[in-house]
């Protein structure tokens, strides 16, 4: 766990490296899977959550808009409502499942795309020349697309069962 002290002037100090850091550097630490804890330098109050929200705000302002307005609106509406704890747990578990399953889904998609490219050697010049093999190729491509859809549905079903 990396401890960060936040001073009144909003500067962040990494206790582990004895150096000041920026919100961008803090963001990189989180992206690399490092666990952080941000504490008020004077009172010792835990400021991790508001600091991470500040990091998200900075990233969003840079043009990386991952959180749709509708999602943000629903989160705001859930605050101070009976579903707040439920939504919090749901979001935490959904993100944990996504983190765990993302590599599997990426690998399955990559494998499917590799299989399509290896089994269906489509050359653009064949299409331009009006190759006689085109109907056979279309059939093979349709079968590959069907296989890919089935694999994606299987992955979706697995994700749903793990989230439950």
Image: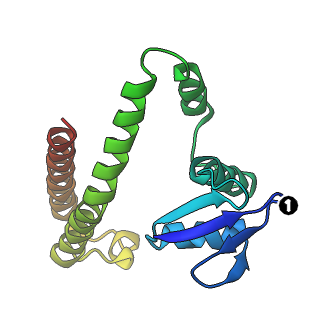
In the image shown, does 48 or 75 lie closer to the viewer? 48
Residue at disc 1, secondary structure: loop
- Residue 64 in view, yes or no: no
Q: Is residue 73 above or below residue 19?
A: above
In the image shown, does 140 or 17 lie closer to the viewer? 17
* Badge count: 1
User: Residue tagged by mark 1?
Assistant: 9
In the image, residue 124 lies at what x, y percent?
38, 75
Q: What residue is drawn where x is 20% and y is 59%? A: 135
In the image, residue 52 lies at what x, y percent?
60, 53
Q: Is residue 102 above or below residue 33?
A: above
Residue at the right extreme of this rendering: 9
Residue at the front extreme of this rendering: 43
In the image, residue 57 lies at what x, y percent?
69, 49
Q: Quadrant of the C terminus?
A: top left
Q: What residue is drawn where x is 69% and y is 51%? A: 54
In the image, residue 75 lies at what x, y percent?
54, 28
In the image, taking residue 66 as reference, residue 21 lies left or right, namely right
Instruction: State the colouring used for the structure image.
Output: rainbow
Q: Is residue 118 above or below residue 65?
A: below
In the image, taking residue 65 as reference, residue 111 lies left or right, namely left
């Amino acid at each position: 766990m990396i401890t960060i002290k936040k001073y009144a002037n909003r500067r962040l100090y990494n206790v582990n490296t004895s150096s000041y850091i920026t919100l961008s550097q803090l963001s990189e630490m989180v992206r690399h899977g490092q666990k952080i804890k941000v504490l008020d330098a004077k009172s010792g109050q835990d400021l991790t959550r508001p600091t991470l929200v500040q990091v998200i705000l900075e990233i969003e302002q840079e043009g990386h808009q991952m959180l749709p307005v509708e999602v943000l609106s629903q989160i705001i509406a859930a605050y101070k409502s009976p579903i707040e704890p439920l939504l919090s747990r749901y979001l935490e578990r959904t993100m944990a499942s996504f983190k765990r399953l993302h590599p599997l889904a990426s690998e399955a998609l990559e494998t499917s795309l590799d299989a399509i490219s290896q089994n269906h050697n489509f050359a653009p010049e064949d299409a331009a020349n009006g190759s006689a093999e085109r109907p056979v190729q279309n059939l093979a491509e349709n079968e590959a697309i069907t296989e890919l859809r089935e694999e994606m549905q299987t992955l979706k079903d697995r994700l749903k069962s793990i989230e439950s």
